[in-house]
Image: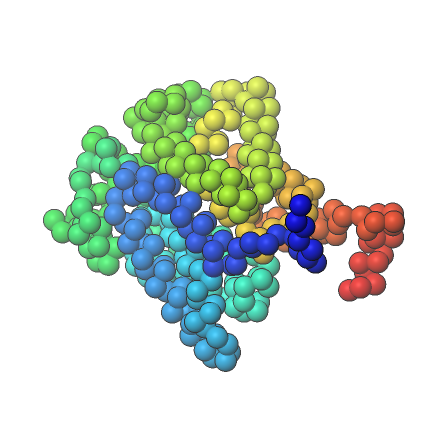
């Protein structure tokens, strides 16, 4: 029998950063395709704009810093950031919105802190929150799914709306937002939150046309898009690109909170399935919260980190002013990562937990 002696780490075929980032991008493809199918070509156009912006921004800043920008760009981390931001904003948002957000994500959130590996916050989510706070009107201009839209739109229409605000036939974005009944559409999360605030029950609020789907009480577009991202996320776990701890603890905490409150008052608190398959919980659990730079590094810490994100998602969605809340929850817990890592640091062999922490303090 032949043995191979080697020093740690004992993984003899490690993936470099570029390979990992490419796998994550590949895993996004099912969700992106479904999002394009339901909401039009605007999603792909936003991805192209974001990709160009993040690459140019990263290259320019690294050139100013006298760094090897070609090597940095080839790690695909900036491109992944651009894609995550692009799929988070409305597909027909004006062109300058995604460019501002992409620049902010790379220049401010990533490079200002020192580049890849040094950023405290998730760049895509920090940029998303900045855009949502700065441009709330443009960030909430979601069109109805293609099957419910009063006016159809092609790839050319998407280009025209993004760059001029009007389709080829002269329809404004406000007109494109209306359904067949001439009613301005909103996302399922927005619709339910508004309806409950107006005194309707949860059951009454989901009786609108946008929620007709194979899964009762869910938007057909939102649920299928979530399934697409779920498939990609499970692929990442199977390929050992990410660990299961953050996604499952985050989804589990959201589910538990929703089940408990639904049992308390099912008339005013949506079901667990509604919360899991609407909005960006799935994509947040597998593609955003698992960011290796801004997330916890220990398995116990990852469980706490993910569960806390799920808890904050439910709290902000239910009692806060933002129906989705994934970006806010992730950023809140990004700030807590050093503390969580400190108290979940593995015990050094032969030392108690207290001694291990003191040893870590001395090394620092």
Q: Nearer the viewer, residue 129 or 19?
A: 19
Quadrant of the rendered image containing residue 174: top left
Quadrant placement of the C terminus: bottom right
Q: Residue furthest left?
A: 169
The total number of labels drawn is 0
* Residue at (22, 54) in percent of width and height: 159
Foreground pick, 61 / 219: 61
Horizontal and vertical percent for residue 169? Answer: 12, 49
Please name the residue shown 17% across and 52% down the image.
Answer: 156
**Residue 241, placed above or below residue 196:** below
Image spot of residue 91 (x, y percent): 31, 48
Q: Which quadrant, please, contains the N terminus?
A: top right
Front residue (pair 241, 158): 241
**Residue 144 picture location, percent across and down:** 28, 37
| Residue 149 image offset from top left, x and y in percent | 22, 36
Residue at 43% x, 40% y: name it: 232
The quarter of the picture where residue 164 lies is bottom left
Q: Of all residues shown, which one is farthest toward the front?
A: 1
Does residue 12 appear anywhere in the picture?
yes
Left or right position of 214 against 273: left
In the picture, measured across the screen, residue 123 lies left or right of residue 164, that is: right
Q: Nearer the viewer, residue 138 or 100?
A: 100
Residue drawn at the location 84% of the way across and 58% of the way down: 359
Colour style of the rendered protein structure: rainbow
Q: Is residue 124 visible?
A: no
């Amino acid at each position: 029998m032949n043995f191979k002696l080697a020093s740690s780490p004992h993984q003899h075929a490690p993936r470099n950063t570029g390979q990992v980032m490419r796998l994550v991008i590949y895993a996004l493809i099912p969700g992106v395709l479904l999002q394009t199918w339901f909401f039009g070509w605007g999603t792909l156009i936003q991805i192209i704009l974001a990709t160009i912006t993040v690459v140019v921004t990263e290259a320019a800043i690294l050139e100013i810093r006298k760094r090897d920008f070609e090597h940095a760009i080839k790690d695909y981390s900036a491109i992944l950031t651009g894609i995550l931001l692009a799929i988070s904003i409305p597909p027909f948002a004006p062109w300058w919105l995604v460019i501002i957000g992409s620049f902010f994500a790379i220049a401010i959130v990533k490079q200002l802190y020192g580049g890849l590996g040094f950023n405290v916050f998730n760049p895509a989510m920090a940029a998303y929150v900045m855009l949502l706070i700065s441009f709330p009107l443009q960030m909430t201009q979601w069109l109805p799914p293609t099957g419910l839209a009063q006016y159809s739109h092609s790839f050319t229409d998407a280009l025209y709306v993004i760059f001029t605000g009007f389709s080829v036939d002269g329809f404004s974005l406000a007109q494109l937002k209306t359904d067949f009944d001439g009613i301005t559409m909103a996302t399922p999360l927005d619709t339910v939150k508004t309806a409950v605030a107006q005194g309707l029950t949860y059951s009454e609020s989901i009786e609108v046309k946008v929620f007709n789907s194979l899964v009762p009480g869910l938007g057909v577009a939102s649920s299928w898009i979530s399934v697409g991202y779920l498939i990609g996320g499970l692929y990442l776990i199977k390929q050992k690109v990410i660990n299961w701890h953050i996604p499952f603890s985050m989804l589990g905490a959201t589910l538990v909170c929703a089940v408990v409150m639904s049992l308390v008052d099912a008339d005013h608190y949506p079901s667990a399935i509604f919360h899991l398959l609407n909005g960006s919980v799935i994509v947040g659990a597998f593609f955003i919260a698992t960011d290796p730079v801004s997330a916890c590094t220990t398995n116990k810490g990852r469980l706490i980190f993910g569960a806390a994100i799920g808890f904050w998602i439910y709290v902000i969605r239910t009692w806060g002013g933002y129906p989705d809340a994934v970006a806010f929850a992730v950023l809140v817990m990004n700030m807590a990562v050093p503390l969580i890592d400190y108290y979940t640091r593995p015990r050094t062999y032969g030392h108690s937990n207290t001694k291990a922490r003191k040893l870590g303090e001395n090394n620092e």
